[in-house]
Amino acid sequence: MKSANSFRKIGMDLTLAQLSWAVWFGAFALAAYIVFPLIGINIESNNKLGQLFSNVLSGSWDKESFNIDNSGFIAFIANPSKIFMLVCGILSVPSFLTFFVKQGLTRKDYFYGAAVSSVAVAFVLAIVSGVVFLIEQLIFAPELQLDYAWPIAIVVYGLNILAYYAAGWLIGAGFYRFSFGGLLFILLAILLAIAVEVMWEMPLSDTLKLAQVWSGLVSILATAVLIGASFTVVRIMTKRIRIKLK
């Protein structure tokens, strides 16, 4: 019972810590998404929020000038989110494992807490990005009927960025335990990222189309298996890892 309570507390603490980073990340990403078009930087051909602010600031409003498609903020933030999660994964072992073990908690508690928090952070990012996407659709295409495949797009988004956390976690744990031997885990992380990208060659927005949903279920399952396997490798490496107290 004590162990269960410990990993839940670690999971909550790590989730709150990493979500605080995510708030800053998301704020900067949204600011870039809105501001860049105002200063002439073309970040996306269908940047609807940016176009809206630009038109309002210039005193013109022509709703018909907006092209409606399934891109928008959720497509814009997808790649930056992968980098953000990769960095979170890399920092997890050196930043948090040492801290929690110093507090008398076990490596097992850390692992399960970190795993839970990584899932929570990934899907909070996915849901928030999806909410911004929905707001865009409500503003620019209120007549658009979203089918029930939309939640699957959120699952796909969450799993994709979670895979990058797993890749970063492999790198962080590898270097923490093996020092320069951790270079091998960079290769393993790259292979994981390539495998996930190959499975999702179609644009993220294509998962919104009902015709693509069922074929994507296999990719969802395969991605989840790869993430689970990566987490297992991290658990094996950290199970008896020597803690660097200095």
Image (tube, rainbow, N blue to C red):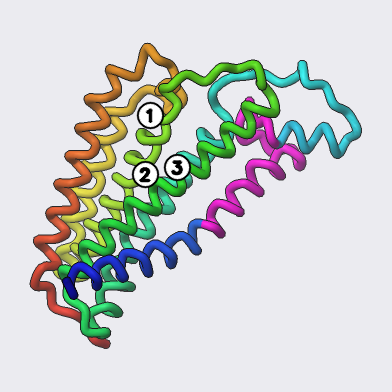
Say left or right for 108 vs 189. left
Looking at the rendered structure, the kind of residue marked 3 is Ala
What label sits on residue 152 in the rendered view?
1
Provide the secondary structure element on which disc 1 rests. Answer: helix
Looking at the rendered structure, the kind of residue marked 1 is Ile
Distance in Å between CA atoms under marks 3 and 1: 11 Å
In the rendered structure, which segment of residues is drawn in magenta? 23-49
- State the residue at coordinates (29%, 57%): 116
Dot 2 or dot 3, earlier in sequence: 3
Q: Residues within 10 Å of mark 1 (few under 14, many from 20)?
A: some
Which of the two discs, 2 and 1, sits closer to the camera? Answer: 1
Q: Quadrant of the C terminus?
A: bottom left
Q: Quadrant of the N terminus?
A: bottom left
Residue 31 on the magenta segment: yes
Place residue 135 in its image quadrant. Answer: top right
Total labels: the figure holds 3
The reply to whether callout 2 and callout 3 are in contact (CB within 8 Å) is yes
Say left or right for 117 vs 1. right
Which of the two discs, 2 and 3, sits closer to the camera? Answer: 3
Provide the secondary structure element on which disc 3 rests. Answer: helix
Residue 87 in sight from this viewpoint: yes
Provide the secondary structure element on which disc 2 rests. Answer: helix
Say left or right for 65 vs 210. right
Q: Which residue does the numbered mark 3 point to in the structure image?
A: 126
Give the image location of residue 187, x and y in percent.
Answer: 20, 49
Q: Which residue does the numbered mark 2 point to in the structure image?
A: 161
- State the residue at coordinates (27%, 18%): 215
Distance in Å between CA atoms under marks 2 and 1: 14 Å
Residue nearest the observer in this picture, 243 or 128: 128
Give the image location of residue 232, x and y in percent.
Answer: 13, 53
